[in-house]
Every structure is written in structure tokens, then in C-alpha cells.
Amino acid sequence: MSGLFARRLVMAVVVGVGASVAVAAMPAGAAGGTHVRGGETVPVYSYADAVRESVWVNTPLDNDRDGVPDRVAVDVVRPRETADRGLKIPVILEASPYYSCCGRGNESERKQYDANGVITKQPLFYDNYFVPRGYAFVAADLAGTNRSTGCMDVGGREEVLSAKAVVDWLNGRATATYADGTPAVATTWTNGRTGMIGKSWDGSVANGVAATGVRGLETIVPIAAISSWYDYQRYNGVLRSPDYPEYLHRYVNGRPGTTCAPVVQQLDEGSDDATGNYNDYWAERDYRRDAGRVRASVLIAHGLNDTNVTTGQFAQWWSRLNVPKKVWLAQQGHVDPFDIRRDAWVALLHRWFDRYLQGLRNGIDREPQVTIETAPGTWVSERTWPAAAARKTRVALGDGDGVTGTLGGGSTSGSRTWTDNPDLSEQAAVAAPNSTVPGRVAFLSAPLTREVRVSGTPSVTLRVKVDQPTTELTARLVDYGTATRVNFDGRGEGITTLATESCWGASTALDDACYRDTAEDVVTNDLAVLARGWQDAAHHVSLRFVTPLRPGKWYSVTVPMQATDQRIAAGHVLGLIIQASDDEYSSPQSGGATITLDLRASALTLPLAGALPKPGATAPIVSTAPPAKRTAPPRFQPLLP
């Protein structure tokens, strides 16, 4: 045993939220063998002696076209004592495409197997923490990834139904075998009550499976998850990156050679880069359409400054759900809450799974639905989201001094004309709002006399005249004012990984429960972009088809922004920045347009708690640091969800 592992075993005595006795010191036979004490599950089962097995679940699909039903590789860790005593337990399931290619968590852990191909190490802490408490943990390789057959279709039917097949197997509705072909029957050890969890792509799968209405799926915990793949790879008709589905397929594909070439071709043709339209391909990958079929309770976690899986993904899913639900919103970017507020998150997960998988009446369903980080390290609980006090508020665009406009007031004849500037970075676009900057127009509120809160989804409606058949329109909502904020633009997207470790569950020599600690990364700066939005002008009628603009004709185009929940302090100034193309966050297919904006028929719409002050005749002077010198913005590079 290494010195590091010895230290980890000692640290594992502190099993998460306040457990002070090591698992090994709590015999399985204590208290009649029950893992429930004082209204919660406790770690009474041996993690070291847990059953570890690898099975293959049969699906009804065959999209690799080999004439054999596709099979999903499933790795299970479960307490040995419960099966020995005939106790049936619930399951925590994470279905992922990342178990071999990329790893999971802040430390990119991968699955590991013994010489016989049986699981020895599961990524993340879920098995270490929950198996001793009377849960099974199941990690499934999505179709076409790692050891599964079939072909990954990036959010589509194959992906979702391959994960659903695992839930069906756990409930006796599907079959599975071990590597030697003998049957693997789950109903001998599980009651079928399943909860799905996962960050990013993994959480997106949980959303998709829940939207099938499958019985036995009792709860899901989607973290920074996608609810519409169109909105992940398109921004209202604007391409995020060409050939994005094919890129994602290649990244996670586990099949040899050209096995999946027909599926890749379908991804290319169905996603329809040429138009950016929302079509049947995207409808299949839009889980929001079937939100009414969701039976499972839902615990959502998302970063309010996530620019990978943007905040509209959780907000539109949340608004459509009619089940017990809770949301946890942090100021970070694309970060797991385990790496933001670890002790509180593990405690919440523990209580959530105890309530919805073990059936323990612990009161979590009667507590406030919403937990929000309002400033670095400051968290509040609220009854609903968006904020109950937020009201849809129309804010007119005023002419101001003819260079910088005002938010509020009005304009009798004001307009702005600008030409698309593809070399304009976001940093340069939002800096110095009182100056003339080619390629952008700016509007500022008067200095706030009291704090206001933007809670929900802002939008801006622009009356525009364009000299070509379409253009991208980009809007940014900006808080101008010095404050200490979470550094979500930093390398860790708002966290710093430390050299120390803490342990969250029981450990073995091959699978320890210890993880590098993290700290919130904060910075003091003079502005923050609160929300962004993009719209292809030729999709102003519908996302399903293109309506080219007639040069010289006026059109009203609404640019929806990403959902947010931010408080803007007294003395700060709220700003609206409007551009055309945006190479940093998208891949524009048209550029160079000259746009004229009619201020009289244009307005910003804010979900506002509080009121903006009455504007002056001109915008206030706002001082910002100059942008870093660079000749052009970084072009958007495809991200992994």
C-alpha cells in the first residue's frame, strides 16, 4: 500500500457529509442489516467486497447494420450483502460516450478492467459513496462507444434508446448476457428504481431517456446538460461550427474502420449545414418536445456563465417540466457542482436519491426549488425560478448623443448604421461603450439608483434594413461596474484545482474515493457580460425555413438571449451591445452586411425585478479597461458537451 493510498484510506473515514466512522468499522449486520437509520441511508455495506460485474444489454436496434441487435456494455458495482439476503436495491445510472475516449470529472477518470474484462474502477465518486449506502451504481457505454456495439448518432434515437434499454433491463423488460454468453438477470438484485445522473453529454442522455416516459426511471440529475441538440449546434439558424455532429461522432466513436460510415453520412445530411434549418433530424434530438412525458423527478445543476452548454438548455427544459423539480445555479461556466461546493452538493444528492430512489420521506420535496449563487460564495434559496418578482419589462432604445444610445426614454427619429466587422472580438465590442467602435452599436442605462435583478430570458427586437439577403445579429447584455466576480473566463471556468485531496466514500486499492480539492476562482473587473444572443436574420419568420431579406426593406427581427439570473448593483450601468457576425461563439456563413437600425421600433425586453432609472438625454460616461490588443477574435473551435 502506497503512502498516498494509506492517507486516502484514512481520509475516506470522513465519508462526505459528516460521516465519522469508516465503512469497514460498520458491519453489514448492524441494526438488522438495514442501510437506513434516522431517516437516511448510511454506509453499512462493504465496498471492498462489492459485486463487480460487466454485462451486455440487448437493444431492439441495429444501426450498424450487421444483422445483430446492438448491445450496450454495462458495468455494475453493487453491495454483495443485499443480494445475499434477498434485498433488492435501487440503481444510480450514468450513461456516457466518454468512458474510454476522454474520461469523466475534473481529473478525467476512465473505466478500468481486469484481465477478464470485468470492471475494477468506475470514474467519479458515485459508486464509492452510494454502494455502501444500499445503492447499485451502473455505468453504461452509449451505443457505438467504448465496448458497446451499434453506432453513435449524437443525441438521436440510437443513443437515447441504448440508454433506455439499460433501464428496461433493470426492470426485467430487456435481456443481457455476461461475456461468456450466459444470461445476466438484474431483477434478482434490483427493484428497478433507477436514477440517471451525468454532466454535459451524460446529463443530456438522462434528459432524452426521461422524455421517453420509460417506467422505472424515478429521477434524473442533468448537470450542464443539453435539452435540444439544435440549440447546442445552432443559434437560431446560425451555425456554431460546420460538420459539428460528425466531429462529435468521431471523437467518441469506438467502432472499427468504416463500420459507422452510413450513420456519419446521415449526420451530415440530416443536420443540414447549408440552411441552418430546424428539421426532422433536429426534432428527433429535441427532448423538450416530449417534456410532458417525463415521469421522473428532476434535479438540474447549471452554470449561469456556461458558454459551452448554454443556459437556455436548462431554462427551456425547466419551464416545460411538470414533475417534482429543483435547480442549482452557480456563477461558474461548464463545471460540475462537485467541484464548486462539494460538501453541500454531495449532501443534496444524498438526500435527493434517498427521497426518490429509497422512498425516504426526508422533506426535500417540500424545500425551496431553487438554489442560486448570487456572488462569489454567496448562495440563496428561493421558491421558484425565474424570480417571482421578475416582470417582463420593455426598455426603449434612445438616440442619446448619436453615438452611444440610451436604455429607456425614446427616439423620435434616431437610427444607427454599421457594417459587419468580423475582426471585432467580444472583448473589444463591450469595452469603451462611449466610443465609436466599427461593427458595434452601444446603449447604456442611467447609473442604477438601487440594485436590480435580471432573472429569466432577455431578448431584443430590432427593426433593421440590410443590404443583403441575410446577416447574423448578435446581442450582449453587459453589467458595467467594478465588482469581484467568478472568473468564468479563466482556464478552470471559475474554479482552481488545488494540490490537496478529500475523500467521498470508501476506497479500494484499485478505485479510491479521493479527489483533488478545488477553490472558487475570482477576479475583480470592471464589467461582465450577463447574457448573449444570436439570430440569423433570414430565419426571422421560422427556424424551419429560410426567408431571405429584400435589401432595403424593413424587418423586425427578435434576438433571444441566453437565460440568466444576475443582480446588478446600485451605481452600475446596464449596457446593450449589438453586432452582426460573431466568430468567437459561432461560424457565420454570411458576413459583410451593412445594417440600419430604426431605434423607434426597436426595444430590449428584460425579465426585471426592480426598475431601471429614468434615462438622461445622453448616456453616462463609462470607464473600462482597454481590450487586450489582438488583430482578430479567436475563431470558434468545436467543443465537447
Image: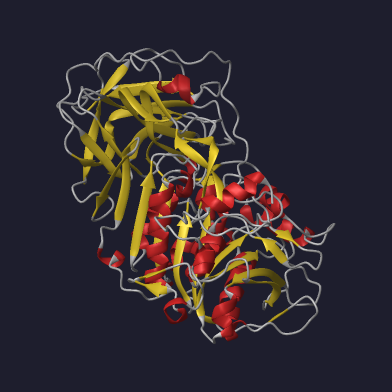
- Tally the numbered discs: 0
Would you say 573 lies left or right of 294 here?
Answer: left
Dividing the picture into quadrants, the one containing residue 56 is bottom right
Front one among 635 and 358: 358
The image quadrant of residue 175 is bottom right
Residue nearer the viewer, 368 or 90: 90
From the viewer's side, name the closer residue of 308 and 561: 308
Where is residue 327? Give x, y as percent: 36, 55
Q: How is the image coloured?
A: secondary structure
Mark yes or no: residue 172 visible. Answer: no
Note whether 404 is above or below 500 in the view shown: above
Q: Is residue 377 visible?
A: yes
Q: Which residue is drawn at 36% across and 64% down?
A: 321
- Residue found at the very far right of the displayed protein: 257
In the picture, measured across the screen, residue 513 lies left or right of residue 451, that is: right
Horizontal and vertical percent position of residue 87:
51, 84
